[in-house]
Image (cartoon, coloured by chain):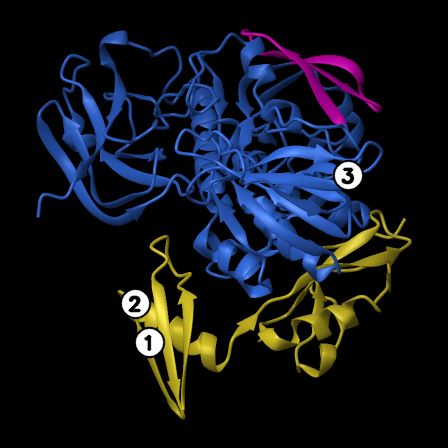
């Protein structure tokens, strides 16, 4: 049995995990299975499971469990593991600060303010939505403008009806899911406007959330005005040109009471920046090595705080690896203090590959194989994903279509990389099919 | 008299534009690049189904609403009838994941089940 009082008094743990969402839960379970006795999860919400709690739609876990679960069901699989493995956690508890010598100050109604030191820390704080302020939409500031995820929480967890006539800006998956959700609850979703010439959402969501309900998706369109002083009374949408500037004369005003924003997710890295960890300007997350370790030894990152994922299955997989690696770090099996700089090779990208995670590998220390995940900059047809060591091609895979909304991956084999130097270089690139 | 429908395949990011022709008992799918597209197009015009998810209010629980889903997919044309039934439901805590909230919801032969535990407080 877990001794609740002992948890509240702890001042040192082996592995401290910040965030009890899908990443934190999978990391914790994996660290325990890899032999760490002393784990603590810090979660600021009143329950474990993170964003999955409000994602009541189905479609989760096809890769992991070979069945289609809802978000809460997917979370429940991991929460029951946490209970079975007797991993302690603190709810309603927030991390205030973190230091490079791995001391974490938390605040909670039951713990008060306390500082806990850890041998290893796993960052699993997830991400936030891009807000109206970050989008610079003109117009008044009436009630009725929500990010899609906030609306989702208000509806699905708190049980509020958000609005009756809705316009959605951005075709990210949460916006698409909310278009269907609000329609099922009796609202009229008038249109979804997307700035880009392609949708950032999954095909399946376009079809099952918009097409099923005859909700029009207008690509290359954006919101140019919000009307109404107390409550949203209308939203004006205009077409944009190739440089994404509104085209005068194309404005159409929709009579509505609600505007939802589904315009991208931003990893929530205030704590990571407090550590002065090296960040990737592309992902908005920490820059990590093949162990998913930041440049602060013993601090690992996984899930959406590291880079925004398309499927939770990949979050769980990545986080489990971070958990195993943190366990190995704590037991001294590998990774600890070994950062022979000669051995570190940054992965470079080209031809539309925007970034890779991990960003660098330690060849002599790496596992037999390492999965490298990445996203592309545009919609590409008939491209080949290739990995080069110097001028030598290590792998090639043809693709029919690549899209920014979908994560891609390649596998690096240690046997192919032995003796690799930074001078030689390792590249992940997209090439046009020459056939 | 044949009928033609334009669909987007959802099996992979390719999103093939399918043209499905229904001529009496004969269904032909064009525009697909793989057998999954053929199967999808055929099912979408002959027997389209969806899983429906929503929430139901809970009395005396540690959270206000319990997420629910149809235990399996139901005919697409019955989605709003299922939702009408969902809107009549109300449960008492505790609720266990998988508990039947409404049996044979809207005459579909499929149960509406809870998608999470709700503890009584």
Q: Position of residue A426 (x, y in %)?
A: 20, 23
Q: Chain of mark 1?
A: B
In-front residue for pair B116/A395: A395
Is A239 placed left or right of A411 in the picture? right
In-front residue for pair A31/A410: A410
Mark 3 surroundings: few (<14), some (14-19) or many (≥20) residues within 10 A: many
Is A98 magenta? The answer is yes
Q: Main secondary structure of the magenta part?
A: strand
As helix, strand or loop, the secondary structure at mark 2 comes to loop
Instruction: Measure the alpha-carbon separation of dots 2 and 3.
Output: 43 Å
Query: The chain drawn blue is chain what?
Result: A
> Tag on residue B32?
2
> Tag on residue A232?
3
Is A106 placed left or right of A302 in the picture? right
The residues colored magenta run: A93-116
Q: Chain of mark 3?
A: A
The quarter of the displayed image where residue B16 is located: bottom left
The residue furthest front is A249
Query: The chain drawn yellow is chain what?
Result: B
Is A162 magenta? The answer is no
- Is residue B82 visible in this depiction of the protein? yes
At 55% from the left and 32% from the top, the residue drawn is A265
At 57% from the left and 58% from the top, the residue drawn is A209
Q: Position of residue B105 (x, y in %)?
A: 73, 77
Q: Which residue is mark 1?
A: B29
């Amino acid at each position: 049995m877990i001794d609740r009082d002992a948890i509240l008094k702890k001042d040192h743990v082996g592995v401290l995990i910040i965030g009890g969402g899908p990443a934190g839960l999978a990391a914790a379970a994996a660290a325990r299975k890899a032999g760490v006795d002393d784990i603590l999860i810090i979660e600021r919400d009143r329950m474990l499971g993170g964003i999955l709690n409000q994602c009541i739609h189905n479609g989760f876990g096809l890769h992991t469990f070979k069945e289609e679960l809802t978000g809460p069901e997917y979370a429940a699989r991991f929460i029951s593991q946490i209970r079975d493995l007797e991993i302690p956690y603190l709810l309603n508890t927030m991390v205030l600060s973190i230091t490079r010598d791995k001391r974490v100050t938390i605040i909670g109604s039951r713990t008060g303010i306390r500082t806990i030191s850890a041998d290893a820390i796993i960052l699993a704080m997830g991400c936030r939505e891009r807000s109206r302020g970050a989008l610079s939409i003109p117009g008044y500031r009436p009630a009725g403008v929500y990010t899609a995820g906030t609306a989702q929480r208000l509806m699905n967890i708190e049980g509020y009806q958000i609005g009756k006539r809705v316009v959605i800006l951005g075709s990210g998956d949460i916006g698409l899911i909310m278009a269907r959700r609000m329609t099922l609850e009796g609202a009229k979703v008038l249109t979804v406007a997307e700035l880009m010439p392609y949708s950032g959402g999954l095909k399946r969501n376009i079809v099952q959330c918009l097409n099923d309900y005859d909700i029009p998706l207008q690509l290359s369109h954006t919101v140019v005005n919000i009307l109404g002083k107390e409550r949203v009374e209308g939203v004006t949408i205009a077409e944009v040109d190739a440089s994404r500037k509104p085209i005068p004369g194309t404005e159409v005003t929709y009579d509505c009471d609600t505007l939802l924003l589904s315009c991208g997710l931003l990893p929530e890295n205030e704590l990571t920046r407090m550590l002065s960890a090296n960040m990737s300007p592309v992902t908005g997350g920490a820059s990590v090595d093949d162990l998913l370790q930041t440049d602060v030894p013993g601090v690992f990152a996984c899930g959406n705080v590291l880079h925004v994922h398309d499927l939770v299955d990949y979050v769980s997989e990545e986080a489990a690896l971070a958990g195993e690696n943190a366990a190995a770090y704590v037991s001294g099996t590998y990774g600890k203090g070994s950062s022979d700089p000669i051995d570190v090779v940054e992965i470079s990208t080209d031809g539309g590959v925007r970034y890779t995670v991990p960003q660098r590998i330690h060849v002599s220390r790496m596992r037999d194989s390492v999965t490298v995940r990445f996203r592309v900059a545009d919609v590409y047809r008939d491209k080949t994903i290739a990995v080069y060591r110097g001028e030598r091609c290590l792998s090639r895979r043809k693709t029919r279509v690549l899209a920014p909304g979908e994560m891609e991956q390649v596998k690096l084999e240690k046997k192919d990389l032995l003796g690799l130097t930074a001078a030689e270089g390792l590249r992940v690139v997209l090439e046009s099919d020459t056939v | 008299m044949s009928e033609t429908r334009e669909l987007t395949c959802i099996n992979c990011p390719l999103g093939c534009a399918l043209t499905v022709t229904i001529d009496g008992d004969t269904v032909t799918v064009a525009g697909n690049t793989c057998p999954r597209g053929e199967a999808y197009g055929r099912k979408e015009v002959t027997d389209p189904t969806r899983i429906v998810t929503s929430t139901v209010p809970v009395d005396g629980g540690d959270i206000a609403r319990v997420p629910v889903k149809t235990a399996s997919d139901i005919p697409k044309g019955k989605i709003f009838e299922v939702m009408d039934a969902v809107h009549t439901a109300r449960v008492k805590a505790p609720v266990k994941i998988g508990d039947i909230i409404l049996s044979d919801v809207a005459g579909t032969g499929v149960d509406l089940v809870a998608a999470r535990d709700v503890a009584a407080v």
